[in-house]
Image: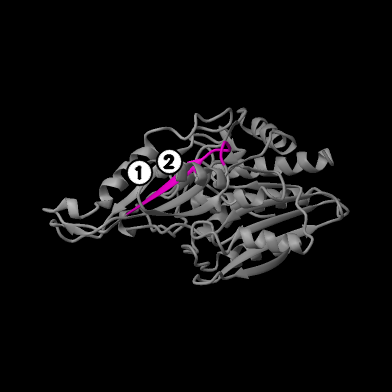
Amino acid sequence: MIDAIALAQALIRCPSVTPEDAGALDVLEKALSPLGFLCRRIKFQAPGTVAVDNLYAKRRFGPGRHFCFAGHSDVVPPGDGTRWSNDPFSGEIINDVLHGRGAVDMKGAIAAFAAGASRFLDRRPRNFDGTISLLITGDEEGLSVNGTKPTIEALASEGEHFDACLVGEPTNPTAIGEMAKIGRRGSLSGHILVKGIQGHVAYPHLADNPVHRLSRMVMVLSEEPLDPGNQHFQPSTLQFTTFDTGNPTNNIIPGEARGRFNVRFNNNFTCRTLEAEITRRLKQVGGEFELKIECRGEAFLTKEGELSRHLADAIESRTGRRPEFSTTGGTSDARFIKDYCPVVEFGLLSATMHKIDEHVAVADILALSEIYESVLERFFDAGPG
């Protein structure tokens, strides 16, 4: 059986800063193969990007239901390593706390996947009817174009069917069992180019200052709320991130001005309807402009049902807490998986993810592994539901 802590340490010691793998998938494959998992590497490379390896490990016993664990082995950069209390890729344990980049997000959860599955399989007869798989990408913290999305599309095109998926993103604010994610807000990025007429600042009547119009556009997009939110989601929010003319002088009215913004939106909108609302508001200001929209993911909600119930029961049995089902936070690869099966997210504490001195209590990884094991027990013992 797999030791969750030893595996988490081994994964952290691979400096897999996105999109580099640095041997992380080799470590995981070496742990899973002796358990009978058939491990397959699936590589993708979108134009203008670096090729990314993804691991699909599957153990199939029969035509029964298929449960998938999904996650990512890539991590964000550690930043200035001298500011860490320990080497960010040491995987060192101090006072029962595991330190290192990826400990929380989300190599600790991947190790818990594998350890929980190994114990579950150890107690099952060889004729157990069902399939367990792990879908691990190396492209979640990066562009997310060579990872989960094309991998699950390729698997589906081959006839692979998933009945449920649990993503191991960190979801708990302060203690294991507080929160699980049953949906995520969508993400839309916009680029506005406002065109004017360049001129001398002393002769503004001969020019058309695009900065003034862009500033009004910022106001019409940000002053009035997009929506009030709903039962499951907080209100959609729009935030400008840049406002620029590229003008190096103080005596020229620029000919163009640019702004960029991002919207985290709930399921009151789709990317298409949100773009229409943004365009409507910009036209209120008038003048010539160009708007380019990039949809990073639609909002989605997994209705409470069998998967969320099994997860909540497993969490409560292990921790005594009944988790809150939330849709807060950023995006995750669950946004790609939701098109193929019900998906929920549950992992470690989120307090130190992406921070210097990222760390997790050893006890939390062990508890998470037991919860994952219990979810498998409940899912397969329940039968089709």
Q: Secondary structure at mark 1?
A: helix
Distance from Cα at disc 1 to Cα at disc 2: 8 Å
Report the magenta residues as a range. 258-269
Residue under label 2, please give it: 281
The local crowd at label 1, few if under 14, some if 14 to 19, many if 20 or more residues have their Cα within 10 Å, is many
Q: Which residue occupies 13% across, 57% down?
A: 251
Residue 143 at least partly seen = yes
Q: Secondary structure at mark 2?
A: helix
**Location of residue 110 in the rendering, given as x and y in whole percent from the top left corner:** 60, 53
Foreground residue among 311 and 252? 252
Q: Which residue occupies 30% across, 46% down?
A: 213
164 in relation to 180, above or below: below
The amino acid marked with disc number 1 is Met
Q: Give the position of the N terminus as an image quadrant.
A: bottom right
Residue 32 at least partly seen = no
Number of callouts: 2
The colour mode here is: one colour
**Location of residue 351 in the rendering, given as x and y in whole percent from the top left corner:** 44, 41
Q: Give the position of the C terminus as an image quadrant.
A: top right
The answer to the question of whether label 1 and label 2 lie on touching residues, with beta carbons closer than 8 A, is yes
**Location of residue 307 in the rendering, given as x and y in whole percent from the top left corner:** 72, 39
Foreground residue among 117 and 289? 289
Foreground residue among 191 and 348? 191
67 in relation to 249, above or below: above
Q: Which residue occupies 39% across, 58% down?
A: 87
Residue under label 1, please give it: 217
